[in-house]
Image (cartoon, rainbow, N blue to C red):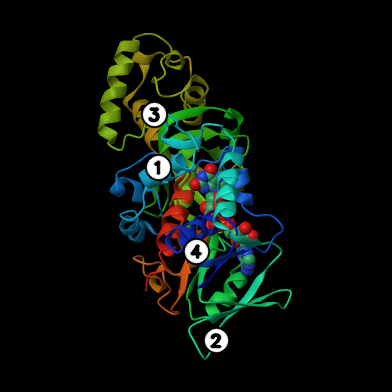
Amino acid sequence: MRVGIIGGGAAGFFSAIHVKENFPAAEVIILEKSNKVLSKVKVSGGGRCNVCNACTDIDELSKNYPRGSRQLRKAFGFFSTRDTMNWFEKQGVQLVVQADQCVFPKSQNSQTIIDCFMDQVMQHGIQVKTSCDVVSVEIAESSESFRVITAGSETLLFDKLIITTGGQPKSEKFNWLRKLGHQVEEPVPSLFTFNMPSEPVKELMCIVVEDALVAIRGTNLKANGPLLITHWGMSGPAILKLSAFGARILAEKKYECTIQVNWLNETAEAEIKTRLEQHLKQGGNRQISNCRLSEIPQRLWDYLLQKIDLPATKSCNQLSTKDCNKLVNVLSNDAYHVSGKTTFKEEFVTCGGVSLNDVSFKTMQSKKVKGLYFAGEVLDIDGITGGFNFQAAWTTAFIAARLLD
Ligand SMILES: Cc1cc2nc3c(=O)[nH]c(=O)nc-3n(C[C@H](O)[C@H](O)[C@H](O)COP(=O)(O)OP(=O)(O)OC[C@H]3O[C@@H](n4cnc5c(N)ncnc54)[C@H](O)[C@@H]3O)c2cc1C
């Protein structure tokens, strides 16, 4: 049996190795369009490669995928984060789990993961063909085998194919997969930070609020977590999560929207009000500027007071009900205009790809073409930051490599 793996990235290597583990007699060839394999693995996690997340609860794990959550919940039953960690450790890659549950190689170097894959490829006799850009796949009429045609007009024959070409920002890059009958969800970027050119809040750059809640006005989209103010707008896990869950809506809005920030991640205004009243009572005749709530950094507190025209020198016991209400409002419902986006540390994924309706998640086999399988980001699956994207690649590659009908 000749198995062609199209795409030499994370999902391509993981599936190739597993095909050989499952079918030692198979001839396995990885076809990679560029002259380098595993280039995203190399740069991932700032060069450290966040291989997966330590979350082992499948329901919790699946919540980290704006697209593909439901299908992955099933797929994680076959291969999940614990299996990823066990697999790498079995190959001699020592791992460390950070306090935020992100899993990295102990070496803190993505090259360790690349070396592990290259060793496995050597041991299993897997061929890797670089500078091999696949431009179309034809189904041979006489049998169920495939003719793979490259940009260099080479034709290669395979009995089974696993497509692991990753996310593609340009829709036309999916044309050869469309030609095979697959529906493609339009690709748009995910995981980005928000530009706020008109907002003076940028002057507070480098300030972090540990647990804020951000929402996109006019939608149901919200996300919470640490929020970082940058010199171009806002970033941090809360914003990245919002960008991922809102990827499609934000693209439709051309990255122009208003976000509402709840600086305390407390949605019950009455709670905030009660807390603030007690706080002001304790403050007595001290100036309001010196009586910030513990979650709000001093510079942000001063900025918010200024934003609502509350004199910083006013003493706590002089605040009127109106002042108090304005303070509650700015703490819980602070609006900012977003205009444009910036890529986060060059880490991004594509929302969109081959429609999940066209793939069986028990096998990762295409429902349109027998003997053709998908794994990794080529599918309409993407996760937030934290090792979730690689986990989706490992899980789908593991399933595809069983080559089940
Ligand atoms: C800078 C950066 C940092 C990241 N860090 C992390 C991280 O730490 N943790 C995490 O979980 N995720 C991270 N991600 C996301 C993660 O890298 C991807 O989700 C993951 O690489 C997807 O794997 P894949 O094999 O599906 O696709 P890719 O890794 O993109 O591999 C696809 C391969 O297919 C090749 N290819 C494409 N088209 C063709 C064709 N027609 N013919 C032949 N070959 C083709 C491409 O050249 C590429 O080598 C990061 C992403 C970026 C950009």
Mark 2 CB near ligand 1 (8 Å cut): no
Residue 316 visible in the snapshot: yes
- Number of the label disc, if any, that sits on residue 352: 4
- Labels 3 and 2 touching (C-beta < 8 A): no
State the residue in front, 285 or 29: 29
Q: What type is the residue that disc 2 sits on? A: Ala
Which image quarter is the C terminus in?
Answer: bottom left
| CA distance for labels 4 and 2 | 29 Å
- Of 4 and 254, the residue lying toward us: 4
Between the C-alphas of marks 1 and 2, the distance is 39 Å
Disc ID at residue 327: 3
Location of mark 2 (residue): 140
Q: Label 4 to label 3, Cα distance in Å? A: 41 Å
Is tag 4's residue or tag 2's residue first in the polypeptide sequence?
Answer: 2
Kind of element beneath mark 3: helix
First of labels 4, 1 by sequence position: 1
Coordinates of residue 13 in the picture (x, y in percent): 54, 56
Residue 283 image position (x, y, % from top left): 35, 11
Any mark on residue 86, and which? 1
Label 4 close to label 1 by CB (< 8 Å): no
Amino acid type indicated by mark 4: Gly
